[in-house]
Image (cartoon, helix red, strand yellow):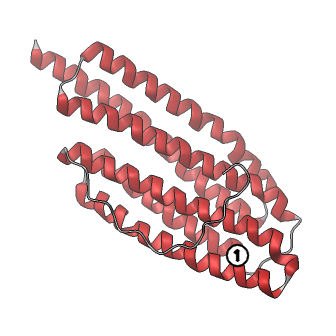
Amino acid sequence: MKKHTLSAFDRDLDAIRLSVLTMGGKVEAAILDASRALEHRDEELAAEVIEGDRAIDAAEQEIDSQVVRLLALRQPQADDLRAAVAVIKIAGEMERLGDYAKNMARRVAVLTTAPTIEGAAGALRRQSRLVGQMLKDMLDSYARLDVDLARDVIARDVEVDDMTNALFREFITHMMEDPRNISACLHYIFIAKNIERMGDLVTHGAENVIFVAEGRRMEPRQKGHSTATIRGPGE
């Protein structure tokens, strides 16, 4: 009877993991589409990202419901409970990633009418691509419980932090050179800071993968240097 219960738990958890991976694919696409919309000032694509966030929110709610049902029906032991709780955390982190992608997309309409800051949107897209690849690898590490890959994801977050710092300094320089650049550069600073936060969320996801696999929390991770401390409205 116990073997049957464990098998049923594993089967149910595998189904939930598949939902998490599907949700992750939507989030990865949202991040990359938002950065592409920003680079090309594509308001139509930005609107699709904003609308698509509804599906990401709904996916998180469904995953939460699935986990609650799993806990109620299967009453898992310590190791299985850890795996179930990690699902909720990872889904919550991805929902927040979707929110940051949506916020990036919302700034496209404003920046379309703002002065062009040479190289800014392209640099932010490169930063987004790095986070998007980290997310893809984090999800792969979760699917396979690959601790080495999860640790590699965590290590790469330092590069995201350093990119944020470099962009922050670059945008400050543009603002000092020409006050007409201030509004656009402030928006770009907020976006760069939000992408940095995306990297933090992906890193938390990788830390949860290690927690599931090894049953212990990691030591505090190294952070890159960042001076991006300005907060945007409502942030």
Position of 37 with respect to 214 (left or right) is right
Residue 182 lies, in percent from the top left, at 81, 74
Task: Report x, y in % for residue 230.
Answer: 66, 65
**Residue at 75% across, 68% down:** 186
Asked whether 104 or 175 is in front, the reply is: 175
| Lateral position of residue 124 relative to residue 19, left or right | right
Residue at (29, 61) in percent of width and height: 151
Quadrant in the picture for residue 170: bottom right
Give the residue number, with chain letter if any, for mark 1. 120
Q: How many discs mark residues in the rendered view?
A: 1
| Closest to the observer, 55 or 224 | 224
Position above or below: 74 against 163: above
Quadrant where the N terminus lies? Answer: top left
Q: What is the three-letter code of the residue carrying label 1?
A: Ala
Circle 1: element type: helix
Residue at left offset 61%, top offset 66%: 229
Kindly give the residue lying farthest to the bottom in the view shown.
Answer: 177
Residue 26 appears in which quarter of the rendering?
top right
In the rendering, at what x and y percent does residue 49 appear?
68, 47
Q: Residues within 10 Å of mark 1 (few under 14, many from 20)?
A: some
Q: Does residue 75 appear left or right of residue 133 in this picture?
A: left
x and y percentages locating residue 161 in the rendered image: 49, 70
- On screen, residue 211 above or below 125: above
- Who is closer to the viewer here, 123 or 173? 173
- In the image, what residue occupies the spot 58% across and 46% down? 98
In the rendered view, would you say 80 is above or below 182? above
